[in-house]
Image: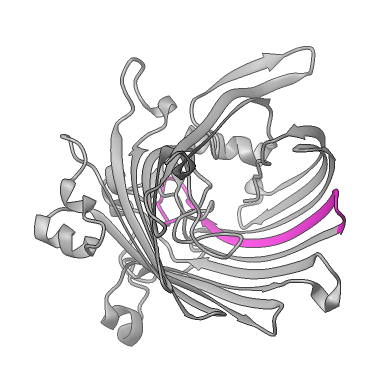
Amino acid sequence: MDDRIYFYANIVETQARFPGYVNERITRDRAIPGAGYYKSYQSELFDISQGYDFLNAQGYIGFNLTRHVGAQFGYGRHFIGNGYRSLLLSDFANNYLYLKLNWKVWRFHYQNIFAELAVNSDKNTPEGQVIPKKYMAAHHLSYNLRPNLNFGVFEAVVFSRNNGFELNYLNPVILYRTAEQGLNSPDNVLIGFDGHWDIFRHVRLYGQFMLDEFVFRELFIERQGWWANKFGIQGGLQYVNVLGIDHLDLRAEFNLVRPYTYSYSDSAAVYNHYHQPLAHPLGANFQEWLLSIRYQPLPRLLIESRLINMQIGEDDKDVNWGGNLLLPNTTRPGDYGNTVAQGVGARIWLAQFDVSYQLAHHVFADLSYVMRRKDSDDDQRDSNTSWISLGLRVNVGRQRFDF
């Protein structure tokens, strides 16, 4: 029986200062991307005027109930998809309490995730009060049509109940949209599709389609940019052992999310957690191209490089153009004429180069260089940022701010 139980835990204590664009995001969301509670500090010794101190912990206990069924209960986050980004569920936001069930039978793999999320960040909650809670129920069913061809269906519902979790959503096989309609509830339901196709032995084509809401006539017939045609599209290619070179991998990816996607009229049903998106870091109202190269010339040496081009639309003078998920979509300026990257347009180029050398088991020396340039229609929002970091890492992952 003991070989069916396992657990994992880690705690990371961080004191850091961030480049200007990350500070702007923290000021807007009142939360550090990927983290929870934090406090500010200053240091004359290290010339830090805007530093942050935060603790991040995660852990879970798992059970292999049978050869085909497993369960996890813990505090962490999840990622669904084959891409660098995920438009369904990503690991960008802060950790959260969850129960996950895994079912693997024949060619099917079925996941259930039941999670407790935070409506606000601690900085947006009055002192002495518990952060308001909301809940998410999600499931993902994938099927291997052939050994090299996989297709998946995703569904998630975000909701808030004053008296706790909505028990109707605990049914592991029900369609949440059906349950929501039966409850006559205002819950936010999203559906999605993903898949990958391995061809030529070394190439994987993959993609995702996320649908928040749409009306067929408005989307395919009249096509006047109705605001509630909310969806996201991902397409990508992964090439392993490029040109026969061992451990040289290439990835190219495109992501697009329409304005107001993931948003809602009520903050308790927005597809976010702790004021952070549960899917793409940019939220909505953007399109993105991404190219990454990963090369491991030696067993202990890893070299990675990424080039990301983002086209976004930002709000102007308190006008909600659909990119910031913290704003209710009822504050939109109009119902029609909505296009991707509307509002104050900006193009962002981000290049990152990382070198990591393994000194010992789970001990790494890291060198990173990041350059980010933002060219906005509003010249006052232009920015150029670059920095170099050198560090020693012990059994923890890297925190990236590539948005």
Q: Quadrant of the N terminus?
A: top left
Residue 174 x/y as whole percent:
21, 62
Q: Residue at x 53, y 34 (%)?
A: 35
Left or right of 311 on screen, residue 360: right
Residue 353 x/y as whole percent:
81, 52
In this view, the residue farthest toward the top is 44
Left or right of 182 on screen, residue 191: right
Quarter where residue 126 is shown: top left
Q: Is residue 316 magenta?
A: yes
120 in relation to 272, above or below: above
54 in relation to 20, above or below: above
Q: Residue at x 41, y 26 (%)?
A: 122
Q: Residue at x 83, y 54 (%)?
A: 303
Residue 370 x/y as whole percent:
78, 47
Q: Specify the segment rendered in magenta.
A: 297-323
Q: Is residue 332 visible?
A: no
Left or right of 139 on screen, residue 399: right
Of 399 and 22, nearer the camera is 399
Left or right of 55 on screen, residue 21: right
Q: Is residue 332 magenta?
A: no
Of 168 and 92, nearer the camera is 168
Q: Is residue 161 visible?
A: yes
Q: Residue at x 51, y 55 (%)?
A: 280
